[in-house]
């Protein structure tokens, strides 16, 4: 027995040794892979694996637990778990994942309320990194140390976003230029972008395959816009374009009212943007604006006019006009009295409208104001919107069908009148079917329309946050009339092409009578457009007078401003379409 026992020891010891060596080898490989990922790939691989793991858990949670026999409270908990896990994933990964999460939050009208409530946290300021971390980005961009390009470079960032942060400095080559704003891309973004976009594509494919939600069509557009935002030379070009549009196309009043900081091209590269530093008060802080004596009406009149000008006249539209991108300062051209001037920042995301789209959008507004439903339906159908009536209601802010009763569509987590779990499940599945249909229709819309409507909705939210001091519809309508008139006159006076066998394609001007008729048509369109605006203005004035009379007679505060009424009309129309209650804050995105 002792001999057998002794013979068994060497074999067991050898097997144990192999196991230890393999374990050590595996641990060493994992440690080396982790170190390589963290030091060389900026944790791109681990961020990708974390995302795939979280997405798999979310998908399994819905597949296994989203069942008809479960009650509405249970279904709501599933949505809450998924939204919370998605939020934590985006925050832990940082960088472009913050933008991915923000993009999902923008689509909150098609998602359960917990997604909007949780993902709104991603709009808070992102943490900044130290100068030591961003100095290599500047050195890589200019081929020399940061100290050779800038002087008095601030140690602490004055602003920080998901992919970049801003410091103050002075130019080493031109100290007399004064204080400048230096926007530097965070060092890990360049290493992470390809991995992150791959992860985004894979997750979109997984969601489409697992749940039948058609979102792959939007992936290419999202990727293109994200890459454009990471190209600071493109942002500098957008800034110069916006500045030039104001100088060439705007009237004198708008040119005085808005300022775009100039770009210092010698200190600008793909990952570093240097512009003039401008002091001002952000629209994020309405209380401070009021304390400084700026009238909300003056500020919003300039803001609405600026973006209406971009949408209907210049065709180069700022894609992200949220309050943090707009400053208010004293107009430097006026030394006699206080006059606000807006400073427009962050030109990374712009959309170039085609002339055809710009004309159609102005014609759509004209048709909405003169109640030409046939024209509205024709334009909506030309844009690929199958439900033209619904689309007209949302864009023109006019309800086109009978509004639902207050006890109409149920909320996502509402058990309904019967309180049954099956009813809640069936309603949410119906919402999913309608959301899929809406996404399919949206995939055919002109890409400009998505950004233009988003721009207008953010401006409306800013107007509401300041107490609705201006009539946006009037200002938008005025610029729509002006932009349409310019296009029609240009078309009437433009030379026409004609094919000649000897000379090929040649240009020849139309007959004088034909050109004159075209100009007259343009002027008639402009006059009728302005008349419709006047009638609408009278209606707004009567509405306001009635409200003040009501408040005077009853002693109650009148809170039914026109923007609030229009929001209610949109809310009810969308509720009727989607089948669940929403709040109008989703229109702010």
Image (cartoon, grey):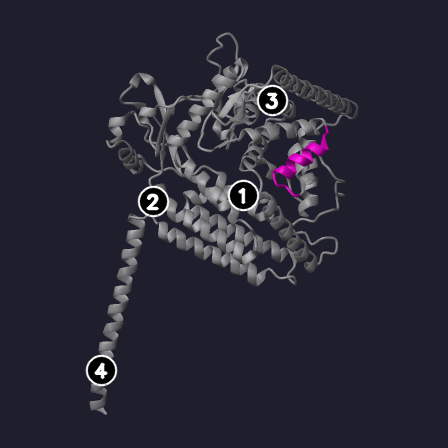
Q: Is residue 457 visible?
A: yes
Residue contact between numbered discs 1 and 2, judged by CB atoms under 8 Å:
no
Q: Earlier in the sequence, mark 2 or mark 4?
A: 4
Q: Earlier in the sequence, mark 1 or mark 2?
A: 1
Residue 547 in magenta stretch: no
1 vs 2, front mark: 2
Give the labeled residue for mark 1.
Answer: 105
Identify the residue shown where x is 46% and y is 55%: 54
- Where disc 3 sits, the SS reads helix
Q: Which residues are magenta?
A: 371-386
Identify the residue shown where x is 28% and y is 64%: 26
In the rendered image, the quadrant that contains the C terminus is top right
Q: Earlier in the sequence, mark 3 or mark 1?
A: 1
Q: Is residue 51 above or below residue 459?
A: below
Give the labeled residue for mark 3.
Answer: 488
**Position of 510 compared to 4: left or right?**
right
Residue 191, disc: 2
Q: Earlier in the sequence, mark 2 or mark 3?
A: 2
Residue contact between numbered discs 2 and 3, judged by CB atoms under 8 Å:
no
2 vs 4, front mark: 2
Q: Earlier in the sequence, mark 1 or mark 4?
A: 4
Q: Residues within 10 Å of mark 2 (few under 14, many from 20)?
A: some
Residue contact between numbered discs 1 and 4, judged by CB atoms under 8 Å:
no
User: In the displayed image of the protein, which residue is found farthest to the front?
Assistant: 502
Give the labeled residue for mark 4.
Answer: 9
Where residue 571 sits in the image (x, y, percent)?
67, 39
Where residue 426 sits in the image (x, y, percent)?
68, 57
Residue 381 in magenta stretch: yes
């Amino acid at each position: 027995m002792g001999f057998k026992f002794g013979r068994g020891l060497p074999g067991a010891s050898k097997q144990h040794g192999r196991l230890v060596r393999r374990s050590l080898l595996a641990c060493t490989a994992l440690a080396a892979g982790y170190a390589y990922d963290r030091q060389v790939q900026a944790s791109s691989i681990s961020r990708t694996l974390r995302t795939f793991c979280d997405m798999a858990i979310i998908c399994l949670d819905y597949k296994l637990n989203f069942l008809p026999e479960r009650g509405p409270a249970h279904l709501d908990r599933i949505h809450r778990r998924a939204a919370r896990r998605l939020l934590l994933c985006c925050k832990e990964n940082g960088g472009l994942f913050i933008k991915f999460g923000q993009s999902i939050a923008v689509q909150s009208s098609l998602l359960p309320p917990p997604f909007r409530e949780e993902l709104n946290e991603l709009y808070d300021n992102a943490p900044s990194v130290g100068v030591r971390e961003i100095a290599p980005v500047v050195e890589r961009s200019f081929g020399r140390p940061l100290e050779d390009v800038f002087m008095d470079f601030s140690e602490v960032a004055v602003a920080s976003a998901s992919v970049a942060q801003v410091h103050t400095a002075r130019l080493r080559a031109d100290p007399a230029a004064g204080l400048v704003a230096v926007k530097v891309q965070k060092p890990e973004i360049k290493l992470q972008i390809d991995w992150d976009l791959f992860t985004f594509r894979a997750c979109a494919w997984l969601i489409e395959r697992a749940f039948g939600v058609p979102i792959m069509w939007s992936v290419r557009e999202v990727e293109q816009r994200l890459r454009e935002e990471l190209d600071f030379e493109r942002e500098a070009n957008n800034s110069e374009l916006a500045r030039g549009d104001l100088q060439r196309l705007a009237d004198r009043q708008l040119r005085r009212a808005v300022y775009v900081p100039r770009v210092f091209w010698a200190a600008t590269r793909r990952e570093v943007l240097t512009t003039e530093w401008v002091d001002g008060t952000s629209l994020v802080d309405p209380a401070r604006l009021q304390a400084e004596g700026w009238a909300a009406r003056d500020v919003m009149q300039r803001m609405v006019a600026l973006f209406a000008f971009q949408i209907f006249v210049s065709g180069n539209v700022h894609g992200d006009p949220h309050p943090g991108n707009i400053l208010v300062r004293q107009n430097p051209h006026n030394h006699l009295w206080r006059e606000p001037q807006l400073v427009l920042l962050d030109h990374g995301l712009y959309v170039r409208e085609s002339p055809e789209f710009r004309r159609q959008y102005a014609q759509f507004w004209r048709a909405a104001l003169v109640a030409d439903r046939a024209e509205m339906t024709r334009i909506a159908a030309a844009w690929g919107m199958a439900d033209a009536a619904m689309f007209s209601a949302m864009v023109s802010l006019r309800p086109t069908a009978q509004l639902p009763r207050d006890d109409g569509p149920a909320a996502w987590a509402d058990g309904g009148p019967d309180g049954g779990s099956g009813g809640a499940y069936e309603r949410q599945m119906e919402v999913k079917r309608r959301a899929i249909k809406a996404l399919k229709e949206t995939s055919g819309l002109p890409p400009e329309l998505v950004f233009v409507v988003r721009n207008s909705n953010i401006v409306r939210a800013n107007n509401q946050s300041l107490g609705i001091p201006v009539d946006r519809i009037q200002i938008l309508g005025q610029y729509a009339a002006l932009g349409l008139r310019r296009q029609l006159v240009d078309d009437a006076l433009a030379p026409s092409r004609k094919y000649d066998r000897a000379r090929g394609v040649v240009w020849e001007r139309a007959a004088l009578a034909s050109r004159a008729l075209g100009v007259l048509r343009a002027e008639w369109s402009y006059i009728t457009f302005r008349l419709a605006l006047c009638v609408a203005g009278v209606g707004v004035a009567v509405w306001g007078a009635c409200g003040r009379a009501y408040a005077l007679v009853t002693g109650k505060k009148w809170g039914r401003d026109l923007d609030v009424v229009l929001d209610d009309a949109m809310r009810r129309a969308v509720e009727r379409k989607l089948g669940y209650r929403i709040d109008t804050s989703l229109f702010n995105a």
